[in-house]
Structures are given as C-alpha cells and as structure tokens.
Image: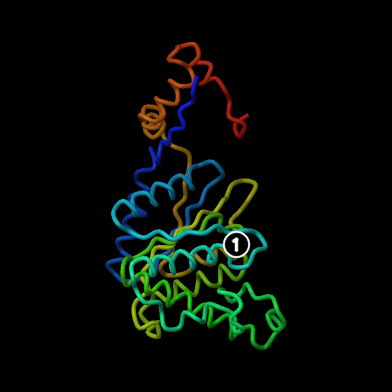
C-alpha cells in the first residue's frame, strides 16, 4: 500500500502563526526590523510553523529569504540570504545598491567578504574590523533595497548553531531598522524569524538570549499541544489521509498505531 506523504501544516498552532503574521504586518507598517525567536524542544513544530509562514507569505505575494546556521561556519545563513536577495532584485529589474561591492572581498575574487581566506582576513588583522563593518553595511543596504519593494521575512534556521559573526550581524540589522539608522537612505523593514532549540538537555546559548534584549525582539515559546490542538491535528484531512494509508481504515490497525510510544516519551 502506498503511503501518503501529507503535510498537516501548523494545525494546533494557529495562534502562533497569527502572531508571526501580525509581527510581519507591524514591520511593514512601521518600517522597522523585528525579530521573533521560536523556542522549544526538538519535534515540537518550530520548523513546520516556519514552513507554513513561508507558504502564507509567498502566496500573498511576499518575499521570504532564508538560510541555515551551521556550527563553525562563518555567516552560513547570510551566504544564502544575500544570494537570494540579489537574485530577487535582479529578477524584478531593480538596481542593486550602489555599495553592493562592499559585500565582496577587497581583491574582488570572492562575492562575499568572509569567503576570502587570504592574509589579513583573521580577526587579529587591523583591516578585519573595517572589512566586517563594510560587509555589515552592505547587507543592510541590500535588505533595505528588498524592503523598498516588499518587506521580507528573513528566516534563520537553527540559530542555536550560529557563529558569533552571524549573531553580531543579526543584531546590527535590527539596529539598522531603528529610526537613527539614517545612513541607509531608506528604512530597513523586515521580520527576522529564527528557530532555537531549548529543552531539559539544551538551553538557549547566552549570545542568542542577548538578542532578546533588543527593543524589537520577542520570544515565542512552543509547548505541547492542548486537547483542542491534538483533536484538530488528528481530525485534519492530511492526518486522516495518512492514518487511512497506514491502516487501511482497520480499527485494530488504528489502535495499534495509537499504541506505539514515541521514542521521546519512552
């Protein structure tokens, strides 16, 4: 029997989805940069919620830029985010920021500054801080150009794996969305969203927690579904289709399926 690969979306997480969409609307209306950290244990539905948010925003004509943090890899999510932002502007025929060259290395051999590993690139180099600041400014201008067309949702997956540079850049971008960041010439409005794993075995890294001190940041904690959420999930068309595909509708097979104890609750 062929198994149906359904997607139950964020059934039971409607209020969290509505809150994220509201934050995106505020970022758009107030021309500001906002951050929402989705916090919870593995398997609680953080990634699924972001996936549903992505679909909602894109179906409404919005822009979603996203990248994944990789432990030990400098600026890993922003390598993808910058590439997607440049592609978006090119596809709609918008001119690139006048200082987009600041994204690359001084030698011109790498499109992104941090990809250049030659002499003078280490943190001890006197040119390091200047090059990093130029790169941060270039990313802010790039996202501001995207925001001038449509306020983007910028997703950073697995932020608990982020390197220090990624977190510093994210904090700088939040500052770029405040009124005193006049050097951009246009407001940086964006909703930054990030998944962070936190449970009994793993706590939010201190440097990630520091982001919540920013005036435009908030934490959205995902816990277990309540009774209404569980009922909605089990009766959703996608869940019913999956149960039918796995059991053929046999009551005994359905009971055996329900009797299976998930590994995390053994």
Give the camera-side residue of 75 and 13: 75
Residue under numbered circle 1? 162
Percent across and percent down for residue 125 are 69, 85
Disc 1: CA contacts within 10 A as few (<14), some (14-19) or many (>=20) = many
Percent across and percent down for residue 97 are 41, 79
Give the camera-side residue of 219 and 91: 91
Percent across and percent down for residue 33 are 39, 69
Residue 218 in view here: no
Total labels drawn: 1
- State the image quarter where residue 96 is shown: bottom left
Residue 183 in view here: yes
Looking at the image, residue 118 lies above or below residue 164: below
In the visual, does 196 lie left or right of 94? right
Percent across and percent down for residue 168 are 56, 72
Residue drawn at (62%, 58%) of the image: 70
Colour style of the rendered protein structure: rainbow
Q: Quadrant of the C terminus?
A: top right
In the visual, does 75 lie left or right of 17? right
Find numbered disc 1 in the image and state the secondary structure of the residue it sits on.
loop
Give the camera-side residue of 76 and 13: 76
Looking at the image, residue 61 lies above or below residue 99: above
In the visual, does 214 lie left or right of 17? right
Looking at the image, residue 176 lies above or below residue 87: below
Residue drawn at (44%, 53%) of the image: 220
């Amino acid at each position: 029997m062929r198994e149906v690969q359904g997607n139950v979306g964020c059934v039971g997480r409607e209020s969290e989805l509505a809150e994220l969409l509201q934050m995106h609307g505020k970022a758009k209306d107030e021309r500001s940069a906002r951050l929402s950290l989705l916090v919870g244990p593995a398997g609680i539905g953080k990634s699924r919620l972001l996936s549903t948010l992505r679909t909602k925003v894109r179906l409404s004509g919005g822009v979603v830029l996203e990248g994944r943090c990789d432990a030990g890899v400098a600026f890993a999510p922003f390598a993808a985010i910058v590439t997607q932002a440049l592609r978006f502007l090119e596809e709609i025929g918008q001119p690139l920021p006048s200082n987009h060259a600041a994204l690359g290395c001084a030698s011109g051999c790498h499109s992104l500054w941090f990809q250049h590993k030659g002499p003078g690139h280490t943190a001890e180099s006197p040119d390091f801080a200047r090059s990093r600041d130029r790169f941060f400014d270039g990313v802010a201008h790039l996202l501001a150009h995207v925001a001038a067309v449509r306020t983007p949702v910028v997703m950073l997956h697995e932020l608990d794996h982020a390197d220090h540079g990624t977190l510093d850049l994210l904090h700088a971008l939040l500052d770029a969305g405040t009124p005193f960041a006049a050097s951009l010439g246009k407001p940086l409005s964006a909703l930054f969203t990030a998944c962070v794993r936190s449970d009994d075995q793993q706590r939010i890294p201190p440097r990630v927690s520091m982001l919540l001190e920013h005036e435009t940041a908030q934490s959205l904690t995902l816990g277990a579904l309540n009774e209404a959420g569980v009922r909605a999930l089990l009766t959703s068309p996608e869940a019913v289709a999956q149960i039918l595909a796995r059991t053929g509708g046999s009551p005994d097979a359905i009971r055996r399926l329900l009797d299976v104890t998930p590994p995390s609750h053994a």
